[in-house]
Image: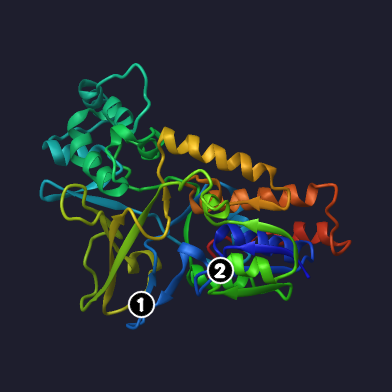
Amino acid sequence: MFDYLVVGAGFAGSVVAERLARGYGKNILLIDRRNHIAGNAFDHYNQHGILVHRYGPHIFHTNSEQVFNYLSQFTSWRCYEHRVLASVDGQLVPVPINRTTVNRLYNLNLTSEDEVEEFFAARAEPRSSVKTSEDVVVSKVGRLLYEKLFRNYTRKQWGKDPSELDAQVTARIPVRTNDDDRYFTDRYQAMPKFGYTRMFENMLDHPNIKIQLGCEYRDVMKEAKYREVIFTGPVDEFFDFRFGELPYRSLRFEHETLDQEFLQPVAVVNYPNDHSYTRITEFKYLTGQAHRQTSIVYEYPAAQGDPYYPVPTPENGSLYKKYAELADKHDKVRFVGRLATYRYYNMDQVVAQALTVCKQIVAAPEFVPAAKAAAAAVGKSLVARPAFAG
């Protein structure tokens, strides 16, 4: 008899499994239909000995001290600030848009933030109501930058025009008036020193956690004995698509190793207007690995395949609410993570959500810790290793 069956060995499922096992002595059966742990963050050494991310680049960043401290129990860190360039009009320009982007694309020499603000203000198209992704960009920087950097990239990525997507898609991307070319500005920006998979292995290294991979959860739910379920898969699938399928965008990856030390000047180069792929990632920038060759991956958005990104439209939001109402009524199943709650979460947000769900579980009147020292164990486990330790 297991206390919890946890479906999905990505961030959401692994954090819940670790907390309930290590913090409260619960017996956990953690399963995944893939043949590995770590979900989409899974990384491995390819046949050339280069550490690559199988499912595209995963860049860790967070402003949450709690999340960073929690993960620091299971990994040392490598300092890394992510930078992205976009190939536009035959040149590479920083993304998000900053002063350098403007100067290069318009052949200008703006030197102050005030000048850049005035430049944007002169080209912005004010909107009485900002509802779509197009509204967000055009109202900030005008139509030309929108066409050059956002519109076609968004069409490729989502299979929809930005005018059809909720504002949240492009609202996530800042517009800067200085020369800061970092993609993120979070307090903590780092990569697991030995990779994500090693971090997950350390996280799940506990005698109370049994891991079963390459299996379907419906088969396990029929055969295994457990008290409750933590489900991190697609919520519409769990309910047999009762109201129809929730749309997702998928990705197809083409990995390649080149016989040269580096290909690009930065880890990621976006291609908003050229090619059928959206971007090329070069992994050695992320990992810091020294190797005479370099490995890259091309990303091709797709309508079919593994679900990666919930498609943020009002219609899809309404459909999800129907499934959320079913989920709320299911007292023996908790739904956690991006797919189970149909939200586009960053990795740190998934970790934060999973930690919150654990607090809710242990705060329930019917919850019985397996050991009297559970509370003390949780407090000790949240003491971080030194940040960015070797």
| Residue at horizontal 43 percent and vertical 45 percent from the top | 185
| Residue at horizontal 38 percent and vertical 32 percent from the top | 167
| Residue wearing tag 2 | 216
- Tell me the element at label 2: loop
Q: Amino acid at mark 1?
A: Ile
Which residue ends up furthest to the top in the rendered image? 128
Indicate whether 224 appears above or below 63.
below
Residue 60: % across, % down: 47, 56
Which residue ends up furthest to the right in the rendered image? 372
Indicate whether 188 appears above or below 262.
above
Number of numbered discs overlaid on the protein picture: 2
Residue 258: % across, % down: 22, 75
Residue 189: % across, % down: 47, 54
Q: Nearer the viewer, mark 2 or mark 1?
A: 2
Q: In this rendering, does residue 289 appear at all?
A: yes
Mark toward the start of the polypeptide (2 vs 1)? 1
Question: Is residue 302 shown left or right of residue 370?
Answer: left
Indicate whether 215 appears above or below 234.
below
| Residue wearing tag 1 | 50
| Residue at horizontal 17 percent and vertical 47 percent from the top | 273
| Residue at horizontal 18 percent and vertical 40 percent from the top | 148
* Mark 2 surroundings: few (<14), some (14-19) or many (≥20) residues within 10 A: some
Q: Amino acid at mark 2?
A: Glu
3D distance between C-alphas at marks 2 and 1 = 31 Å
**167 or 187: nearer the viewer:** 167
Question: Is residue 220 shown left or right of residue 54?
Answer: right
Rendered-image quadrant of the N terminus: bottom right
Residue 137: % across, % down: 29, 31
Question: Is residue 264 shown left or right of residue 19?
Answer: left
Q: In this rendering, does residue 100 appear at all?
A: no
* Mark 1 surroundings: few (<14), some (14-19) or many (≥20) residues within 10 A: many
- Tell me the element at label 1: loop
